[in-house]
Amino acid sequence: MDRDKDLDSEQLQAKLLEITADIRSLAKNYQGDNLALLAILRGLEEVHGEIRDGFFQASLPDTRQKLYDLLKDIEEKGGWPYIERMNLISVLKKLP
């Protein structure tokens, strides 16, 4: 059973690396085009929200042990996912 989980985890990590590389490549292709890059960021934020509000919330633990396992994973492997937004001051600093 654990071996199957490890295999699934390896496949997931490989797929995530592939998707991440594709997104980086897409962003690099539009380097300098702030509207296209903003569209990419909006798309990522939309997907993040869909996963968080749909799939993730539906999968939340229903036992204390499962909750403990989830919290332990969050603590050990990098915390809670967050998409940071630029504030207006950061944008205005770019103006001459």
Image (tube, grey):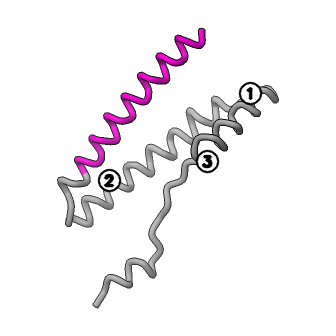
Q: Is residue 21 magenta?
A: yes
Q: Position of residue 92 (x, y in %)?
A: 38, 83
Q: Position of residue 86 (x, y in %)?
A: 45, 69
Nearer the viewer's eye, disc 2 or disc 3? 3
19 horizontally vs 9: left or right:
left
Q: Which residue is mark 2?
A: 40
- Choose between 15 and 38: the one closer to the eye: 15
Q: Which residue is mark 3?
A: 79
Which residue is pictured at 20% across the width and 57% down the height?
A: 30
Could you say which quadrant of the image residue 37 lies in?
A: bottom left
Q: Which callout, 1 or 3, points at the residue further toward the start of the chain? A: 1
Q: Is residue 26 above or below residue 58?
A: below
Residue type at tag 2: Ile
- Choose between 93 and 7: the one closer to the eye: 7
- Choose between 79 and 34: the one closer to the eye: 79
Q: Classify the position of the N terminus by image quarter.
A: top right
Answer few, some or many: residues within 10 Å of disc 2's Cα (few below 14, many 20 plus, some between 14 and 19).
some
Q: CA distance from mark 1 to mark 3?
A: 17 Å
